[in-house]
Amino acid sequence: MKGMVWCAGILAVALATGATPRVAEAELAGCDLPKVDNFVLFVDQSGSMYKSHAEAGEVKEVLAKQTLLELNQEVPSKFCCLDSALYLFAPFAEVKAPYVHDQNSLATRIGWIPDRQPVSLRLTPMAKGFEELTPVVSGAKGRTAVIVVTDGGSNTGGDPIAAARALVAAKPGTCLHVVSLADCDHGREINAELAKITPECRSVEAREILGNTPKMQQFARDVFCKSRPPTPRRGG
């Protein structure tokens, strides 16, 4: 019952309306300066992501898409020239190459991620995914946030933690954020280790932010924003 509660409300509305994201009413409060120059959504599309979440009872990829649609609504629009990109892994695929962020364009491309794919014979070579993303991140200008959305089900290939560390090392200053859809101990362990690579960068459980506007906005602030330092008062 507890697992059903965290997404039942949002899915009842979102799925009934074709997963149409809500309209953002205003820019994020406390978002004065950009923390990053570009961001990459890196989404697991392995077979395990097309299984129902053990607690939520909905396909994990559907939950991932709705979470990203909500996050996209909170990306600050006032910062000039913020680039966005969307890549999938297991297998690796480019959905949106790095380019100036446009909310509607990214929402469309998030919608292109299939809601249903075969589960069997679709393993999760997560390490290979990080290796294939590394040239994309290395070629980006300025500060980069990589938002990894996964159930942590790496089950073939090399060490995903070592591959993720190598990606961050290839582009110093890269922030690795994990949005976890793990529903087993193995997945939780992998995602926890990924989050430790850049511990100063925020990682969350999807259930913390999906359908919860204040928490989604805080996650967006943590990824994209800095507050302007207070102006020192002059002595009288």
Image (cartoon, rainbow, N blue to C red):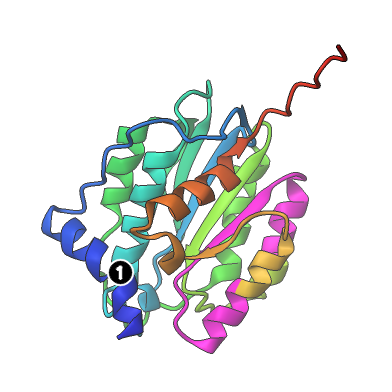
Q: Decide if residue 233 is on the left or right side of residue 149.
A: right
Q: Nearer the viewer, residue 167 or 152?
A: 152
* Residue 145 higher or lower than 116, as above or below: above
Q: Quadrant of residue 13?
A: bottom left
Q: Residue 89, percent across and down?
A: 47, 62
Q: Residue 222, percent across and down?
A: 59, 47
- Residue annotated with mark 1: 7
Which residue lies at the image location 59% right of the left edge and 72% below the top edge? 191
Which residue lies at the image location 30% right of the left edge and 75% below the top edge? 5
Q: Decide if residue 154 is on the left or right side of residue 15.
A: right
Mark 1 residue crowding within 10 angstroms, few (<14) / some (14–19) / many (20+): many
Q: Nearer the viewer, residue 204 or 6?
A: 6
Magenta extent: 163-191
Q: Nearer the viewer, residue 104 or 234?
A: 234
* Residue 118 higher or lower than 110, as above or below: below
Q: Nearer the viewer, residue 116 or 230?
A: 230
Q: For the N terminus, which image quadrant? A: bottom left
Q: Quadrant of residue 16?
A: bottom left
Q: Residue 101, percent across and down?
A: 44, 31
The amino acid type of the residue labelled 1 equals Cys
Which residue lies at the image location 39% right of the left edge and 43% below the top edge? 72
Can residue 93 be seen?
no
Which residue lies at the image location 48% right of the left edge and 86% below the top edge? 184
Q: For the C terminus, which image quadrant? A: top right
User: Does the magenta segment cover residue 168?
Assistant: yes
Q: Quadrant of residue 195?
A: bottom right
Can residue 75 be seen?
yes
Q: Secondary structure at mark 1?
A: helix
